Image (cartoon, grey):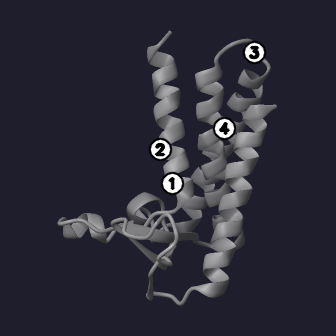
Amino acid sequence: MRYLAVFLGICFAEIRLKNHVEDNWDPGKVHTPPADSPAAGLPVRLRRYHNHGAFLNLGEDHKKGVLLLSLFFTLALSLLFLVTLFQKGKGLLKTGLSFLLGGAFSNTYDRLRRGYVVDYFSLQSPFPRLNSIVFNLADFAILIGSLMIAASEMCK
C-alpha cells in the first residue's frame, strides 16, 4: 500500500504544482522564492516553461510520436509495477517503480491534457548550457526511480 501512496503522492502533488505554475506564473519571468522558503538562497531559478518534446526538448517537432512513446512506456511500466507489487520482497524495485511512475504519469498527463509538459525550475551554475535546462519535480522522480530500479537489479 505504501508504494501506491508514493506513486499517487508524487503524481498528484506534481499535477497540482504544475497547475499552480500555469495559473499564477508569467511565461519567461523568473520568480524569486520568498526569503523564508526552503528554496531561498539555493542556486535555483523558478520560471514557467512549456516543453513540447521529451527531455531537453528532444522530439519537439514530433509531438505525437513523443506522446505515443510516453503512453507506451508508462503503460508498460504500470504493468510491471502491478506484477511486482504483489510479489514478496523487491522493496527497492517497488519503490523505484513508484517514483518512476509518479513522474511518468504526471508528465504523460500534461502531454495529453495540455500538449506539452510544464517545467518550472532550472539551476544556476557557471555552465551556460546547464542553466538553460528547465526541469520539474517529475523529472527528478523519474531519475531517482530509474536509479533505484538499476540499483535493485545490481543488488540481486
Amino acid tagged 4:
Ser
For label 3, the residue is 87
Q: Residue furthest left?
A: 126
* Gap between marks 3 and 4 measured at Cα: 15 Å
Amino acid tagged 3:
Gln
- Screen quadrant of the N terminus: top right
Q: Secondary structure at mark 3?
A: loop
For label 4, the residue is 98
Residue 125 relative to residue 81: left or right: left
Instruction: State which quadrant residue 94 falls in.
Output: top right
Camera sees residue 52: no
Q: Are marks 2 and 1 in contact (CB under 8 Å)?
A: yes
Sequence-wise first label, 1 or 4: 4
Of the numbered discs in the image, which one, if any, rests on residue 139?
Answer: 1
Please, is residue 27 above or below residue 82 in the view?
A: below
Residue 44 relative to residue 156: left or right: left
Query: In percent of the image, x 75 and y 48: which residue is there?
Result: 8
Amino acid tagged 2:
Leu
Instruction: State which quadrant residue 29 falls in.
Output: bottom left
Query: In percent of the image, x 33 and y 66: which residue is there?
Result: 43
Query: In percent of the image, x 70 and y 41: which residue is there?
Result: 6
* Gap between marks 2 and 4 measured at Cα: 12 Å
Please, is residue 89 above or below residue 61 in the view?
A: above
